[in-house]
Image: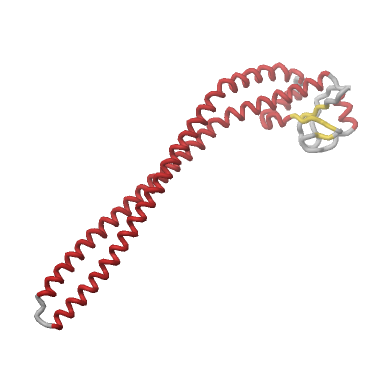
Amino acid sequence: MTTSTSHEYHHLHGLLQQLDDAEQTLAHGPGRIAVAEKKVAAAEQSCMDQKEQIQLLKKTVDQNSLNLKSREAEVSKLTLRLNEASSNKEYDIIQAQMASAKSADEELEDQILSLLSQVDEADEELKRRTNEVSELKQKMADIATRVRSIEPGLKSEIERLTTEIAEADAVIPTGESRTTYQRLRAAMGPAAMALVEGGFCTACNTGATSQDLVRMNMSEFLLCRACGRILYLVREE
């Protein structure tokens, strides 16, 4: 038959677990917001990087366009010289120069077209990243709202559980046993206690001796021989 003390240990253990859950949930809230903020910051930095890339592409387009105009002006000069050529040899030389200049111009035009295409693609990517920032900001706001909405309830729950635990842990004997309980609780939280089921510690699966079972049935304060947790036994009548 389970003693009332065993039930009190079981009740205390349950309260400690509830308190730990509530404290972890409360502590997890700011962490969730911080993670969301980091994601937003990373997405915003990605947008800035993309804008810089677009600026570099446009700058290269502008420079190549200036170079192209300069080369076209050079072709115009060669055309005038061609009309003024005084010999067939000079005419052939100028024609060769014009052919080379036009070929270089065509290559430069192709580069400009390619760069303009890259600018368009980069602009589309910037739009995508900008939309991602907006979505992440909305998610961050939703998380912050959710965290703040449950904070009062969690704090109230923690306060209630702390009060109940202060009453429930009166089942722990005074003296060395209480000191041990306080030390284990500070270090392990609810894991400071372990239920014995089927004759085994449910935390480390170490078997309790017959003497251990007798002592637990007599409501004695007992630690697991292997893991050092406070053991208690609860059986149905």
x and y, in percent, of residue 83 in the image: 11, 74
- 147 relative to 221 in the view: left or right: left
Front-most of residues 233 and 112: 112
Identity of the residue drawn at 81% across and 20% down: 5
Front-most of residues 133 and 11: 133
The residue sitting at the right extreme is 210
The quarter in which the N terminus is drawn is top right
Identity of the residue drawn at 36% across and 51% down: 120
Quadrant assignment, res 192: top right
The quarter in which the C terminus is drawn is top right
Q: Is residue 203 above or below residue 234?
A: below
Identity of the residue drawn at 47% across and 33% down: 138
- 204 relative to 75 in the view: left or right: right
What is the tally of numbered marks visible in this picture? Answer: 0
Quadrant assignment, res 152: top right
- 88 relative to 152 in the view: left or right: left
The residue sitting at the front extreme is 83
x and y, in percent, of residue 178 in the image: 73, 23
Quadrant assignment, res 155: top right
x and y, in percent, of residue 212 in the image: 86, 30
Front-most of residues 104 and 60: 104
Q: In this view, does 133 lie above or below 153?
A: below
Q: In this view, does 90 lie above or below 127?
A: below
x and y, in percent, of residue 176 in the image: 75, 24
